Amino acid sequence: MESSCIPTQFNVKSLALRESGRTPGWTFPGFIKLPECLTKSRNLPTRCLATSDGGFRRETHGVGSRDGVIIVDHGSRRKESNLMLNEFVSMFRDKTGYLIVEPAHMELAEPSIRDAFGSCVQQGAIRVIVSPFFLFPGRHWHQDIPSLTAEAAKKHPGVSYIITAPLGLHELLLDVVNDRIKHCLSHVAGDADECSVCAGTGKCQIY
């Protein structure tokens, strides 16, 4: 908690310190009305800043209930590949608990970035977070996705957006690649079934 969350007429020393188990915390006197940002932060990292009219403004560094997330891949003419993005988005939504998460394909398939952006806004998003499901920052990240997102945003004035970094050199990807290698080797050795990616393709074999 930052001191800017506390009305200036009250000194931090006037707050009572309580013990709850092993976790100490501050208890405000009953006559102090806490700003909403202290009571409804949904466990997100939050900073409360005083405004000129004596109120408070919340700054949340994380995905909130009025944020929409778009996970965008390249798009494929192969229907099965596009459906995998839908499955990933469903897994991501369940894992994170984010309320508004939509899939999008940069090209070749629907929904487009424009469609997903509009869907987020219809669900109440006032900020859209576009997360490229790409490995490295190539031309699509530098040019195509920003251009398509900017065009989509024109239809929704007042809605801000951000395009995040692609997956890149993230340490967790090392485990993902290693897991894929081990599983495929186990499959060709007869010790495991095909994974969901290779299932039905017959591609996972020694040539």
Image (cartoon, helix red, strand yellow):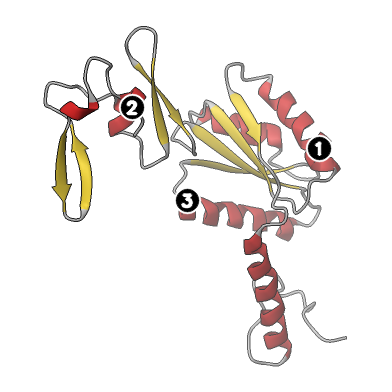
In this orientation, does residue 199 appear?
no
Query: Which is more N-terminal, label 1 or label 3?
Result: 3
Query: Which is more N-terminal, label 2 or label 1?
Result: 2
Q: Residue furthest front?
A: 13
State which quarter of the image contains the C terminus. Answer: bottom right
| Front residue of this view, candidates 114 and 132 | 132
Q: Quadrant of residue 22?
A: bottom left
Query: Which is more N-terminal, label 2 or label 3?
Result: 2
Q: Residues within 10 Å of mark 3 (few under 14, many from 20)?
A: few
| Front residue of this view, candidates 137 and 123 | 137
Q: Which mark is residue 3?
A: 2
| Up-down relation of residue 129 to residue 153 (above or below) | below
State which quarter of the image contains the N terminus. Answer: top left
Q: Which mark is residue 142?
A: 1
| Front residue of this view, candidates 130 and 171 | 171
In this orientation, does residue 18 appear?
yes
Q: Quadrant of residue 160?
A: top right
Q: Residue furthest left?
A: 30
Q: Could you give the CA–CA distance between mark 3 and mark 2, rounded to whole angstroms?
A: 30 Å
Q: Position of residue 101 (x, y in %)?
A: 54, 43
Q: Secondary structure at mark 3?
A: helix
| Front residue of this view, candidates 44 and 9 | 9
> Mark 1 is on which residue type?
His
> Mark 2 is on which residue type?
Ser
| Up-down relation of residue 80 to residue 117 (above or below) | below
Q: Could you give the CA–CA distance between mark 1 and mark 2, rounded to whole angstroms?
A: 40 Å
Q: Is residue 64 left or right of residue 179?
A: left
Which residue carries the number 3 mark? 96
From the viewer's perspective, is the residue at label 1 or at label 2 nearer? Answer: 2
Q: Residues within 10 Å of mark 2 (few under 14, many from 20)?
A: few
Q: Residue furthest right?
A: 207
